[in-house]
Image (cartoon, rainbow, N blue to C red):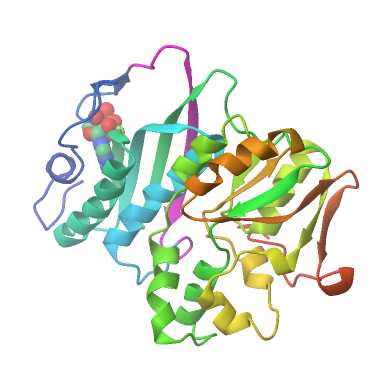
């Protein structure tokens, strides 16, 4: 890449994307033709990748620090859903131009989160084009220890961490489709721009949850994946969906659950716990600082049944996010 900014591709990589230090598992990091890494004994790799495209996955007005944070956070969220310990990631950047101050802030947001979760940047690719960021993240899981979508069984309880729908509120505020009291605005924008991946929680769930998924496309779509892959159905009581005070302030009176059910961008975990693991689960619960809610149960009959007062069924307005729908 060559640019009026006079910062070449290699200078750019050296300046903004060379980590100061990395773990002993990284034998060769950024700067050679490929990275060389060592897998600890008895561990397997969980590998995931996610692309963020400007205007699709984040509003064009998003600050670069948040873009750096979110690009890594959504990948860490996938590792969390697998019960994997974050290890390494690569970064593929497509940039319209070299903008030093943008790169500085993007890199600061990216590396702040990387340090927090002890995940090392080991390589990437840098090209000119519309703004888009692809991260591939690798995590360690003990052999056969990963949390999968396939393990939910009839009678398991369904849980969700944190709260749902706040990112959806923030986005609708930006679109001027909704008004939110100023007090609540920082928290919903933090949820949209700087999601917290539930990595520690995912690790705690290893050996306890029968199935797990992270909520990126909305509960209906993502719980739907667990149900389809596990060959079961479920009943969810919408009144039990965990929502914030901000959400309540907008939808509390009208009982509107659609954003919590279907907007997505929550990056919470949805998981199932079998009766035999319930006691052990209750013991780890105090470590879930984000909180969690029992929203329903796995049933034999296929499909997802939403219920509300007096067992009446709740009809959702949307089924969740689908790029091609
Ligand atoms: P190659 O020509 O072999 O594809 P590149 O010139 O693309 O290598 O990259 C040189 C080095 O810089 C490689 O180690 C690559 O992994 C790393 N790299 C390139 N872009 C990035 C980036 N955005 N973030 C981190 N490392 C990068
Ligand atoms: Mg390359």
Residue 23 lies in quadrant: top left
- Residue at 76% of width from left, 70% of height from top? 316
Q: Residue furthest top?
A: 41
Residue 199 lies in quadrant: top left
Residue 21 placement, left or right of 272: left
- Residue at 39% of width from left, 63% of height from top? 193
**x, y percent for residue 325:** 68, 60
Query: In this rendering, is residue 98 above or below 232?
Result: below
Q: Residue furthest right?
A: 301
Query: In this rendering, is residue 296 above or below 156?
Result: below
Bounds of the magenta segment? 38-57
Residue 25 counted in the magenta span:
no
Q: Residue furthest left?
A: 6
**x, y percent for residue 111:** 25, 46
Residue 300 placement, left or right of 152: right
Residue 50 counted in the magenta span:
yes
Query: In this rendering, is residue 203 above or below 52?
Result: above
Query: In this rendering, is residue 129 above or below 85?
Result: below
**x, y percent for residue 283:** 57, 40
Residue 139 placement, left or right of 35: right
**x, y percent for residue 29:** 24, 26
> Quarter for ligand 1?
top left
């Amino acid at each position: 890449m060559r640019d009026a900014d006079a910062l070449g591709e290699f200078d750019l990589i050296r300046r903004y994307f060379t980590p100061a230090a990395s773990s002993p598992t990284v034998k060769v990091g950024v700067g050679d033709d490929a990275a060389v890494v060592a897998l600890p004994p008895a561990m397997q790799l969980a590998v995931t990748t996610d692309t963020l495209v400007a205007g699709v996955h984040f509003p064009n007005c998003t600050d670069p620090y948040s873009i750096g944070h979110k690009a890594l956070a959504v990948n860490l969220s996938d590792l969390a859903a697998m019960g994997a310990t974050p290890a390494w990631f690569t970064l593929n950047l497509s940039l319209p131009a070299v903008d030093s101050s943008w790169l500085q802030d993007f890199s600061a947001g990216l590396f702040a989160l990387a340090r927090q979760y002890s995940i090392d940047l080991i390589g990437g690719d840098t090209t000119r084009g519309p703004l888009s960021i692809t991260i591939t993240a690798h995590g360690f899981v003990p052999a056969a220890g990963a949390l999968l979508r396939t393990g939910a069984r009839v009678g398991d309880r369904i849980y969700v961490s944190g709260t749902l729908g706040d990112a959806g509120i923030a986005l609708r505020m930006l679109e001027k489709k909704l008004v939110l009291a100023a007090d609540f605005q920082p928290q919903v924008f933090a949820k949209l721009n700087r999601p917290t991946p539930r990595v520690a929680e995912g690790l705690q769930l290893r050996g306890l949850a029968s199935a797990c998924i992270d909520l990126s496309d909305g509960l209906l779509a993502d719980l739907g994946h667990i149900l389809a892959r596990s060959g079961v159905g479920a009943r969810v009581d919408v009144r039990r969906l965990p929502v914030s005070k901000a959400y309540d302030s907008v939808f509390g009176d009208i009982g509107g659950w659609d954003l919590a059910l279907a907007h997505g961008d929550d990056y919470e975990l949805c998981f199932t716990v079998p009766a035999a693991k319930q006691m052990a689960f209750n013991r780890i619960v105090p470590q879930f600082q984000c909180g969690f809610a029992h929203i329903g149960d796995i049933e034999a009959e296929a499909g997802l049944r939403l219920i509300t007062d007096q067992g009446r069924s709740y009809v959702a307005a949307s089924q969740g996010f689908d790029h091609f729908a």
